[in-house]
């Protein structure tokens, strides 16, 4: 067994952390996975043995120091082990989004020159086989699930367990070399390479060192007092920096257990069974869960609905204050305790949040009403602000300083500054090394003193030191009359409504703002069923007159809210259209992390944008779509364009 490789001042690499954990708390649970309805568990000692066997197998397959190993699939302990094993063998792990199409995978694997890919199942094998002719450096594929692969050509295809057995069988042959490679690893060695989502072009390979990963994991774990007995559910994409830090960095630093659900379909059931104490989800997950709760309450009896509404109104009044340890009257506490027994406790159990001690949301702004709903239940939900280039953490909300309108204060070791144009800059131990094979972008993003341009516009509040983000700096512009244009500010307000899944606002250098809207098929579909309204497709439901009326009321409510903000009052939406299809990553309209690709949308739907601004009442359009099997098709539709009431603003009144 390889010796724990640590220095006097602590472990200097991800594999060294694994060795430390296997030595210091060998029998504690490290990873769990649910398969065929049964939870399987591995201790830290067992995890080290599994990882070492795979790393030895990689050496037998000819993996060299500095090679890149692509890792593709859903969250499974075996794939996390593949990333650690790659670094243990002196190589660099590169996780990819499992829902990426073959061409997207080809770009990433070709760009980094991956020689080996470790994949989850037949779907990922097929995608790589489809594009392997474009990958001159690619040599071998290791697959985890053998189903459907029996008749494939196995000359360059190996089963994961077989590679491990190969490693165990050739241990004496390779163990000295493996230990030598591990001994070379230090804080400046590359720990992982993660690709950005690519909102404005091709994804960039973000090189993160062991220093980035370990220092960030250490400081963020201490910030929230994370402990060895904490539990997390690993369900977010493995290619996303947040999952890497939570499920690898923080897990290895603190020694807590990483739990992998059986599938996306069973995620909520598995969440309830595990009852994580530390939980992260983007706003869309919290919004979807709340929508599901509200749909169920619509179907509940009159008494149950009254009971829910009564106690939730009280929870909103005193719940956050109780959570923050503030002074609350005895009677209010007593009523809240009764609500905990009858409503809040059972609801948290249904959601899987009964044991959550620290919860975070990030990626997009979360609606204040949604944020406050969860906190009113006694769930310590907070916001953080981060980037791949920062190894996640830039700012976070300390306990007792949680607000819906900020993203918190600087994380330990992080410095912030705001440029003259409002762009946020930071530097920290988590700042990335470079963009791989892209010195120009590296220089544009990170200066010689280590300050990184976030691309976001914001400001630091005086007194509190909390950071507030307005929008992407490149998206902040001006209306034709000089007023500020910040589309994301308005889009986030629109997406706060359960009926609205996505929104894209236009208006830069124009006289007024307009918007595309995507309805949420789950929420609106449930409303249609309750009201006996039949529909055959998303398109048919989206253009239903009552749906259009509802969306218009939401737009006008947002306009009233935006009008109250003197700085952004010019961003009210004058006209909107409910799109005939959902914006989709497969169609290039969103990134894999569901960020809007504005330039592509503006080009693809130019005819609809033109109609929004030329006074048309409707527009006929045809749009290319990509089906699940990769085939291309098209959707034709005639869309209604609606006018929305806007509020007078101080700017207009002054002009008059």
Image (spheres, grey):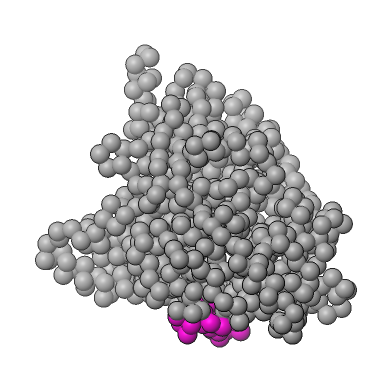
Q: Which residues are magenta?
A: 25-46
Does residue 586 appear left or right of residue 649 in this picture?
A: right
Residue that sits furthest to the left in the current view: 330
Q: Residue 86 at what x, y percent from top left?
A: 66, 67
**Residue visible at 29% across and 65% down in the picture:** 378
**Residue visible at 40% across and 74% down in the picture:** 228
**Residue visible at 65% across and 61% down in the picture:** 93
**Residue 88 falls within the magenta-colored stretch:** no
Asked whether residue 204 is in view, the answer is yes
Q: Residue 262 at what x, y percent from top left?
A: 58, 76
Residue that sits furthest to the top in the current view: 656
Depth order, front residue of 470/106: 106
Is 331 rendered above or below residue 563?
below
Depth order, front residue of 547/570: 570
Does residue 266 appear left or right of residue 177 in this picture?
A: left
Give the quarter of the figure containing the N terminus: bottom right
**Residue 28 falls within the magenta-colored stretch:** yes
Give the quarter of the figure containing the C terminus: top left
Q: Residue 169 at what x, y percent from top left?
A: 74, 85
Does residue 595 appear left or right of residue 166 in this picture?
A: left
Does residue 211 appear left or right of residue 358 in this picture?
A: right
Figure disc tally: 0
Q: Please tell me in which quadrant of the rendered image residue 127 appears.
A: bottom right
């Amino acid at each position: 067994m390889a010796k724990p490789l640590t220095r006097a001042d602590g472990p200097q690499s991800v594999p060294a952390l694994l060795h430390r954990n296997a030595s210091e708390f060998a029998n504690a649970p490290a990873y769990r996975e649910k398969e065929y309805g049964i939870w399987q568990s591995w201790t830290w000692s067992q995890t080290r043995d599994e990882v070492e066997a795979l790393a030895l197998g990689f050496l037998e397959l000819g993996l060299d120091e500095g090679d890149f190993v692509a890792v593709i699939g859903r969250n499974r302990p075996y794939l996390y082990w593949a990333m650690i094993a790659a670094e243990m063998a002196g190589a660099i792990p590169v996780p990819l989004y499992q829902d990426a199409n073959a061409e997207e995978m080809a770009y990433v694997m070709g760009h980094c020159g991956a020689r080996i890919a470790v994949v989850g199942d037949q779907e990922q094998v097929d995608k790589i086989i489809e594009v392997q002719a474009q990958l001159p450096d690619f040599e071998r594929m290791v697959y985890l699930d053998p189903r459907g692969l029996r008749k494939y050509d196995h000359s360059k295809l190996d089963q994961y367990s077989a590679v491990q057995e190969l490693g165990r069988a050739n241990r004496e042959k390779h163990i000295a070399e493996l230990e030598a490679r591990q001994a070379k690893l230090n804080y400046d060695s590359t720990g992982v390479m993660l690709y950005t989502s690519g909102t404005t072009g091709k994804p960039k390979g973000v090189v993160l060192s062991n220093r980035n990963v370990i220092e960030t994991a250490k400081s963020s774990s201490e910030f929230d007092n994370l402990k060895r007995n904490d539990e997390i559910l690993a369900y977010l994409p493995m290619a996303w920096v947040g999952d890497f830090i939570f499920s690898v960095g923080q897990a290895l630093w603190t020694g807590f257990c990483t739990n992998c659900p059986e599938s996306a379909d069973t995620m909520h059931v598995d969440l309830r069974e595990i009852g994580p104490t530390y939980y992260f989800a983007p706003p869309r997950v919290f919004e979807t869960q709340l929508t599901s709760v509200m749909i169920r309450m619509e179907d509940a009896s009159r008494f149950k609905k009254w009971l829910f509404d009564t106690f939730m109104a009280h929870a909103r009044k005193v719940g956050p204050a109780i959570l923050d340890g503030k002074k609350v009257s005895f009677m209010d506490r007593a009523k809240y305790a009764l609500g905990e027994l009858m409503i809040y406790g059972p609801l948290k159990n249904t959601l899987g949040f009964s044991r959550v001690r620290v919860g975070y949301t990030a990626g997009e702004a979360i609606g204040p009403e949604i944020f406050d709903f969860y906190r009113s239940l006694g769930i310590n939900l907070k916001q953080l602000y981060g980037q791949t280039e920062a190894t996640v953490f830039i700012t976070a909300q300390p306990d007792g300083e949680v607000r819906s309108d900020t993203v918190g204060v600087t994380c330990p070791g992080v410095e912030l500054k705001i440029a003259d144009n409002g762009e946020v800059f930071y530097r920290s131990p988590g700042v990335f090394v470079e963009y791989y094979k892209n010195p120009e972008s590296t220089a544009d993003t990170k200066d010689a003193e280590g300050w990184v341009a976030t691309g976001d516009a914001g400001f630091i509040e005086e007194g509190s030191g909390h950071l507030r983000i307005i929008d992407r700096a490149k998206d902040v512009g001006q209306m034709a009359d000089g007023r500020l244009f910040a589309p994301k500010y308005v889009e986030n307000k629109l997406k706060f409504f359960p009926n609205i899944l996505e929104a894209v606002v236009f208006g830069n250098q124009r006289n007024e703002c307009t918007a595309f809207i995507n309805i949420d098929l789950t929420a609106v579909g449930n409303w249609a069923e309750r009201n006996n309204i039949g529909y055959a497709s998303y398109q048919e439901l989206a253009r239903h007159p009552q749906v259009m009326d509802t969306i218009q009321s939401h737009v006008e409510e947002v306009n009233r809210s935006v009008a109250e903000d003197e700085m952004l009052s010019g961003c009210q939406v004058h006209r909107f259209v409910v799109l005939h299809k959902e914006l989709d990553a497969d169609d290039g309209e969103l990134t894999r992390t569901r960020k809007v690709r504005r330039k592509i949308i503006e080009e693809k739907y130019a005819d609809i944008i033109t109609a929004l601004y030329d006074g048309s009442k409707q527009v006929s359009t045809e749009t290319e779509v990509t089906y699940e099997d990769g085939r291309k098709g098209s959707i034709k539709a005639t869309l209604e364009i609606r006018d929305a009431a806007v509020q007078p603003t101080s700017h207009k009144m002054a002009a008059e």
